[in-house]
Image (spheres, rainbow, N blue to C red):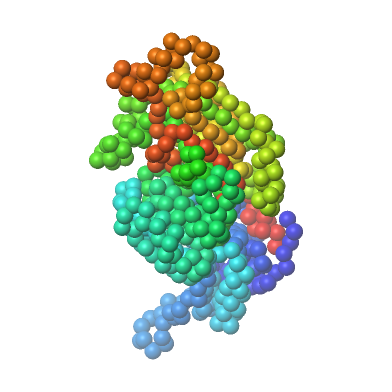
Amino acid sequence: MEKQPRLLCSELCVQRRPYEVTLNCAILAWKDVQIGQKHTGRAIYGAVKAGSHCVPVCEIIAVQEMEDDSPSKDTGKWQKVPQSPVDCQHAFTVFYIERRTRKHCWRCSNVTFHCPEQSLCLLWVQTIREQLGLLTNRPKRLLVYINPYGGKQRGKQIYDHKVAPIFSQAAISTDVIVTERANHARDHLKTEADLKKYDGVVCVGGDGMFSEIMHGLVSRMQQDAGVDESSMEETLVPCGLRIGIIPAGSTDCVCYATVGSNDPVTSALHIVVGDSQPMDICSVHNEDSFLRYSVSLLGYGFYGDVLADSERKRWMGPARYDISGVKTFLSHRYYEGTVSFLPAEGSLGTPRDKMQCLSGCSICRQTSSDRPVSKDEDSVSDAESRDTWTVIRGKFLAINAASMSCACPRSPKGLSPSAHLADGTTDLILVRKCSRIDFLRHLLRHTNKDDQFDHSFVEVYRVKQFRFTPRHQECDSEVDLRENGAGGKRFLSQICREHRACGCMPSQSNWNCDGEILPHTAIQVRVHCQLITLFARGIEEQPVFEDPYTHCAI
């Protein structure tokens, strides 16, 4: 690591012990001068204890000069004599991010430095604040939407007690709106919000609340740019504002996949330091009609049936998903249809390469550098790929498109462990008709580390676009081709399509689009690369350094 020039170096006191404190443009470090031998540090930044410590300047939340609370000489009471080797009357406190032993969780920690002179104390405070001021990626004003009804209905309490104090400490001003109805946040963003005033939009809630914010923000960007959302051929305009997620829902799948935990304090700290994580968005159309955007899961068959059944049991709370899941599994319905897709030719990685999308993912970075710079280039690329579409017909228990791993506490690896957040693709998973026991084996593998695609009845493809047409909606020419002139068979299938009372298995399921049921089953899906950006940095691999002070390279 290249050494950075020192900005300040002083001997200050921490908990009445002398420390050599050093600041450069990248690192703040302090080392106990009374200890000659080096101590082993845990993780990368430890709590204050005898030894060496350092914290990146970019992860300092704030610095605050402490009030001079030294007692007056005229109190007439006995005074305790300071045990410090230096008379340190003046002090300042640095608030910074500390990584806890719980995986991927951050906490706000602090250390107080005592100075022998007020001028030295002011110099340290001013210099640290100047360095923080150079971090232009940090937000200064945020628009916050709180869903008071999502999850366990603790959204407002979580924000008031855990998040608002952190924003206040970091000098971030906020405008807070508590939503009063479904799609309140989406409608406000699309029509009323003055987005030029803000550096980002924050949602406090679950995946449904995030979907509202995302739809409102993406639609507003297209509206302002004059882009027609109903056209599949349009290249959508990326959102300029970052989105922050404070998890307060039932699953918090998006937050879990981009941060690594569903902890509100951790998410708030990612917002404070101004992290950026681009994300792909899928647009879903039915013919020339725009339906919805999807950021995590599009599921037909099993996951669509689970959602449709659970909507009729909302009175049961979160337990309805378990009840509906068991009921749907036992029903064991399969659906006929045609899936056609455009493979992601030339992209790095495959759905089964076990390359998890982590912070600083090389595949997503390369995709960003390879993105077309104009609509013309994008349309030419699409034109060149029109002849490479793959068509699959069959009977399916489930058809899933995962644009991220879809990991959550119940499924730590998710539906597609190697799916990437920002590579311009989605992983299309086809589960063909099989026995109940085989399907159960497939589902159970979502909860462990076994390869859930290692079954003869499961196929997975990395795609840029795909279409699905249920069998009963296919045109007569497609039916004629498949049935190859078998008139009697076609006649019977026509009766089943038109007369549901015959007792045959339902001919179609529903599409589960990020927890919402789509009104159509015949859909076209296109992935839009890095259309939005979150206040996140992806899931971090946690390095361990033997000597954090040496690692600072000061």
**Residue 318 at least partly seen:** yes
Q: What residue is shown at x 52% (from left), y 44% (from top)?
A: 283
Q: Which quarter of the rendering shows the N terminus?
A: bottom right
In the rendered image, residue 90, in percent from the top left (x then y), is placed at 52, 78
59 is higher (above) or lower (below) than 256: below
Q: What residue is shown at x 44% (from left), y 12% (from top)?
A: 489
In the rendered image, residue 373, in percent from the top left (x then y), is placed at 69, 53
Q: From the viewer's side, name the closer residue of 417 and 143.
A: 143
361 is higher (above) or lower (below) than 478: below
Q: From the viewer's side, name the closer residue of 319 and 143.
A: 143
Residue 496 located left or right of residue 542? left
Q: What residue is shown at x 58% (from left), y 37% (from top)?
A: 465
292 is higher (above) or lower (below) than 111: above
Residue 516 located left or right of residue 373? left
Residue at the left extreme of this rendering: 315
Residue 501 located left or right of residue 227? left
Q: Residue 330 lies in what quarter of the image?
A: top left
**Residue 257 at least partly seen:** no
Q: From the viewer's side, name the closer residue of 348 and 504.
A: 504
In the rendered image, residue 174, in percent from the top left (x then y), is placed at 43, 67
Q: How many marks?
A: 0
Q: From the viewer's side, name the closer residue of 416 and 117.
A: 416
Q: What residue is shown at x 48% (from left), y 39% (from top)?
A: 286
